[in-house]
Amino acid sequence: MKGYFSLVLHSHLPYVINHGEWPHGMDWLYEAAAETYIPLLREFQSLISDGISPNITIGLTPILSEQLASEKFKHGFIHYLDQKIAAAEENLSEFENQGQEHLIHLAEMWRNKYSDVKSYYSSQLDRNIIAAFKKMQDSGHIEIITCGATHGYFPLLGTDESIDAQVRVGKETYRRHFGRDPKGIWLPECAYRPSYEWSSPIAEYPKKFYRRGVEEFLFKYDIQYFIVDKHLILGGKNRGVYLDRFDSLKALWKQFEKNWKPLEEEKERSIYENYLVSSTGTSRAAVAYGRHEESSLQVWSGEYGYPGDGRYLDFHKKHFPGGHRYWKVTSAKADLADKQEYYPEDVEEALENQATHFVELLDSYISKYYDESGKVGILTAPFDTELFGHWWFEGPRFVGKVLRKLYKNDDVKVITLGNHLEKSRPKTVISMPEGSWGQGGFHYIWLNEWTEWTWKHVYGAEDQMVELANKYAETKDDVVRRILNQLAREVLLLESSDWQFLISTWSARDYAESRLTVHAEHIKHLAKILASYDQNKLLTEREQVYLAKIEEVDDVFPGIDFTYWRTLKARESEEKK
């Protein structure tokens, strides 16, 4: 054996339950479950049945886990699948009346697909996607990692208490769903920040104080490893992962590129090694694995990667009613009017050849490192899970074929990151700069002229949360605790990095702006109710109705405790006593 390969999938959607259905809202969750999570579960189960352990590392964010486990999702998902089946049948009748034989065949394909998903979800999974992933982990076939509670963008959050709470709630939610503690974490947007004296980037909300490095929070909660982009370990130019898919980002990037300089390359480091990361020179460290950019882009890129093959199902062109897709990519330059009809039988050759090519590519990279260094390295390939199945319809089958071929490969062994860390504890301690896997390696996707206003609301809410947590930390009043616990949920939901991402990509800008505003208003209203109650020691009928309604709408993280937001130094000094 010459080296290891670790496939890392990051599964995440913002909180959408009770916040819209279509086109933005619950349908995102239903689509991801039907097109990505269940097809991947079926692919993994097929591998296991054939005696092949998938050995992938998969992140299920806390807020996604909360949603997939909710009864509202479980009931709504069945209704959604019934709608998709009915739409396929309506399309079928339409195409029969038009005498379009090939489209009839495709409509039958969609009807059968969603019928199969419904049957599998109900009978094989017992309507519990989270339990299915847990069972695979308990059996040693996959490793599940956690994330920040609501995918808050760590480098830009305004208080250390906010990052502490994101990690703590993330770990506690993981334990509740999966019955153990996580070994690893997917930092939201692979965004890391070392310790240094930080100044707020928002002129309207000036702040300046010494910030802790992200690794210090991971160490505190015994989270052993995380994943970062290549440039944070090696320096050099970062290609990012989103630019190919969103034209608005290309325009936005042009504004920043002229003032951006890549980091100097670190020639003594290797992307095939893991490293202890510490920005303080202390033992408060965690292990970083770097994204292997070249192989990852071969799979990720819609322009020159595998998903851009003309034979694959096109993502953008849809038939209504129902939204089913009947056309193929055709070519990279084909507009929607030029898309040709999809032929499922044509993709088998593409999948087989590209899976073979990818395995040969992995083998060549790993073998080259082994031959040059004499070391058994690891190639880490992280992706958003939703690429496989949602963006790239054939993606789950590609994953299955790759894992089957690697099983027969004597030089490359597939391994989870947790298992690799047990075998290969790093001895080298490094420091890393601030950055993410966004284009340019920094924050511009989440902080730019379109999103700057959002951070003013985030920073105000975070500071208020710390202030209130300190003020009421010792209270025994159940009403006060109830109000503050809900306020804490709203702060977490406000911090979701999805709102800035959706604004910058224009993919659901109005929805994101509305959601951020709604949570900011909830926070303000809850704070007013708290102040009124503190003075009068009672809730008016209107206040009771409002509080109960918000608790019902944003019903996540049942074990949350607002005291998590107390000043870190005060909490830590008490813990030492």
Image (spheres, grey):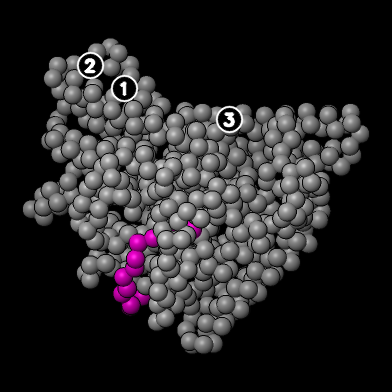
Q: Which residue bears the numbered disc 1?
A: 547
Residue at the spot 14% in from the left edge and 30% down from the top edge: 476
Q: Earlier in the sequence, mark 2 or mark 3?
A: 3
Inter-mark Cα distance, 1 to 2: 10 Å
Classed neighbour count for the residue bearing mark 1: other residues with Cα under 10 Å, few (<14), some (14–19), many (≥20): many
Q: Earlier in the sequence, mark 3 or mark 1?
A: 3
Q: Is residue 228 visible?
A: yes
Tag 1 and tag 2, C-beta contact below 8 Å: yes
Q: Which residue bears the numbered disc 3?
A: 22
Percent coordinates x, y for residue 255 in the rendering: 47, 53
Residue at the spot 33% in from the left edge and 27% down from the top edge: 522
Classed neighbour count for the residue bearing mark 3: other residues with Cα under 10 Å, few (<14), some (14–19), many (≥20): few
The numbered mark at residue 539 is 2
Amino acid type for the residue under numbered disc 1 = Leu
Q: Which element carries disc 3, helix, strand or loop?
A: loop
Inter-mark Cα distance, 2 to 3: 36 Å
Percent coordinates x, y for residue 147 in the rendering: 40, 51
Residue at the farthest right position: 99
Q: Which element carries disc 1, helix, strand or loop?
A: helix
Tag 2 and tag 3, C-beta contact below 8 Å: no
Check the picture and name the quadrant holding the N terminus.
bottom right
Give the magenta part as a residue range: 425-440
Tag 3 and tag 1, C-beta contact below 8 Å: no
